[in-house]
Amino acid sequence: MANNTTYNIRIDSRIRKEADELFKSMGMSLSSAINLFLTQSVIQRRLPINEIIAEPLGEPPADDEYHSFESWEQAKEWLNAEA
């Protein structure tokens, strides 16, 4: 039997809601998804994601709208258009 522990973390409420919905659609809880992420991090000895944006995106837009981008270039174009 696994020896479980409880750990409190702060998560943006909007991201939490979207993550709950996403993982529920995959048949798992947010807790299960976080455990999967942590387990893969330990196994791989790195962040288990394919791509990380190396440059910061800067401050979020004033309207706090969530945007996703396919590349850093696309994000820079969007940021420059908003300026």
Image (cartoon, rainbow, N blue to C red):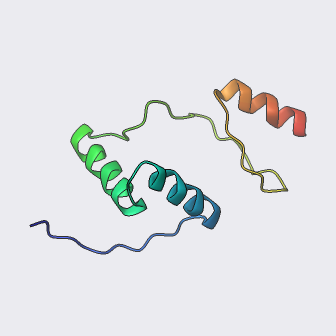
Q: Is residue 77 above or below residue 11?
A: above
Q: Is residue 38 above or below residue 51?
A: below
Q: Residue at x 64, y 26 (%)?
A: 71
Where is the N terminus found, in terms of image quarters? bottom left
Query: Is residue 78 rendered to the left or right of residue 42?
Result: right
Q: Is residue 54 above or below residue 27?
A: above
Where is the C terminus found, in terms of image quarters? top right
Q: Is residue 58 above or below residue 29?
A: above
- x and y percentages locating residue 35 in the rendered image: 31, 56
Q: Residue at x 84, y 56 (%)?
A: 63
Query: Is residue 47 rendered to the left or right of residue 62?
Result: left
- x and y percentages locating residue 33 in the rendered image: 38, 54
Closest to the observer, 27 or 19: 27
- x and y percentages locating residue 56 in the rendered image: 64, 41
Q: Residue at x 51, y 69 (%)?
A: 10
User: Which corner quadrant of the image does residue 68 belong to?
Assistant: top right
Q: Residue at x 89, y 33 (%)?
A: 81
Query: Is residue 81 rendered to the left or right of residue 58?
Result: right
Q: Residue furthest left?
A: 1
User: Which corner quadrant of the image does residue 48 belong to?
Assistant: top left
Closest to the observer, 11 or 19: 19
